[in-house]
Image: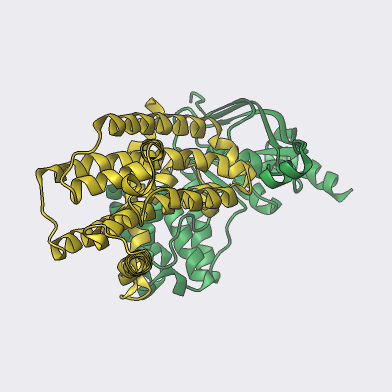
Amino acid sequence: MKRFIENTKRYFKYAVYSARADLKAEVAGSYLNWLWWILDPMFFMMIYIFIASVVFKTTEPYFPVFIFTGLTVWDYFNRNINASVKIVSANRAIVTKIYIPKYILVLQKSFVTFFKMLISWGLVVILMFLWKVPLTIHILYFIPILLVLYMVTFGISLILTHFGIFIEDLGNVVALGLRLLFYLSGIFYNIVTRIPKPFNKILLNCNPVAFIINSFRDTLLYGKAPSFLVLGGWFMIGLVLIAIGIHIIHKYENSYAKVI
Amino acid sequence: MKKEAAITVKDLHIAYRGLKKFSIKRSLLKGKKSNIEIFEAVKGISFEVEKGKILGFIGKNGSGKSTTLRALAGIFSPDKGSIDLHGNSVSLLSIGVGFQPKLTGRENIYLAGMLLGFSEQQIKEKEEEIISFADIGEFIYKPVKTYSSGMYSKLAFAITAVLETDIMLIDEVLSVGDATFKEKSYNKMHELISDANRTVVIVSHSLSTIRELCDEVLWLHEGNIKKIGTPDEVIPEYETFMAN
């Protein structure tokens, strides 16, 4: 714990600077590059709107905002998890030359993706405005839900970072798992109304991504408060996952350079 | 003068094990664990370096020189034994760690410097010196990917040479850039390592460099210390050994 705080203090600035450098580098190629951060989810949204409202005739209110909320959360989760499996070998040049706490790499990645997610949230706000979603005080719950999303994602990423080094085809397994999770997270449908009872409740409470997406929609679209019990539960699980992740990385990180 | 140790290594063992990675697919197909190979690169070496001294590692390929150096830099942890750096800061002098090719040279100075554990403020103070030492002119404001390989190494060398640490670890004395820069970097290296407060560990195959620079030479052979002593004692014996 003490080591974690000391290391983080020492390398936090690096993580921030290097995340900024990564984002800058993405834009440096062409000035239109940052447009892709917006265009990519926009086009996805349009595809889903077409499928859901034309093909499946959904009656979800504020449908574009509904979908965009789901996609924003999913993209963030998906990018982090996918990257974490290979993150140490991706930074091979650094890891074999210098000591750096390996979770700093995960932290750096999470800053990059978090920034992109914030842009995406900005678009959600614009869409909410365009579709005239009524605002309520419940919108304030946005912050704690975002925190839980960050913590759960960070925790899982840390643990996958460790196992990704020793299990060479973990990437394939994780990609498979993520695809399954994508359909179980209610990104383009509403889990509460579309899945029969009692499975909808079970799915909602056991799948953090589904729960978080649903909570965001509750606060932003429907003016409802999220379930504090479940939110608190995932907060605790997030903490535990981070603690486990940091612990195993501390314990084994010095052998990583030998394996990759 | 009282002797003060900067590096104390006791009974250092380092093994590479399980170099073959575990694969879910393979273990499902075969149904058994892949057997683990253990290769001991360093088999229990002990030595001490006094503060301000220069130690050279010699030995044939695969004798554990680079592994020991990396262990000193903190990249590997010892499997057995201990390394005590007595609170000194340490850096492995290596080329272009953590460069982001799409960013300019100036931005990369900050990136690489922070990776070495320096604060933004400390780098800012040294920035001018690094830029003038690297001597790549206007290119410092251009993305690193547009650099020639010589310019790339010049910048990288300048960063590690100007941002100094108490203990410097050098794997193969660097010869980068054109003749002028080579001379400049050699002089800089000389200046760096002859600083009375700086402890240096050098790995090199060039015996003339070792003879010229080092106070002490450690000869590693297949993970063990074969001989340790002054260059005049060790190098002739090493030369006759290698000739056979």
Q: Which chain is represented by green in the image?
A: B
Give x and y (percent) for residue B179. 55, 70
Residue at the extreme right of the image, as rendered:
B244
Quadrant of the image occupied by residue B13? top right
Question: Which hue is chain A drawn in?
Answer: yellow
| Chosen colour scheme | by chain
Q: Is residue B20 left or right of residue A47?
A: right
Quadrant of the image occupied by residue A42? bottom left
Q: Determine if residue B198 is in view.
A: yes
Give x and y (percent) for residue B45. 69, 29
Q: Is residue B181 left or right of residue A214?
A: right
Residue positioned 30% across, 55% down in the render: A117
Which is nearer the eye, A63 or A101? A63
Which is nearer the eye, A140 or B97? A140
Quadrant of the image occupied by residue B15? top right
Q: Is residue A177 left or right of residue A221?
A: right
| Label total for image | 0
Could you tell me which quadrant the N terminus of chain A lies in? top left
Residue positioned 49% across, 58% down in the render: B96
Residue positioned 72% across, 44% down in the render: B20
Which is nearer the eye, B139 or A158? A158
Q: Determine if residue B55 is in view.
A: no
Give x and y (percent) for residue A173. 58, 48
Which is nearer the eye, B27 or A28? B27
Give x and y (percent) for residue B117. 39, 44
Residue positioned 38% across, 65% down in the render: B105
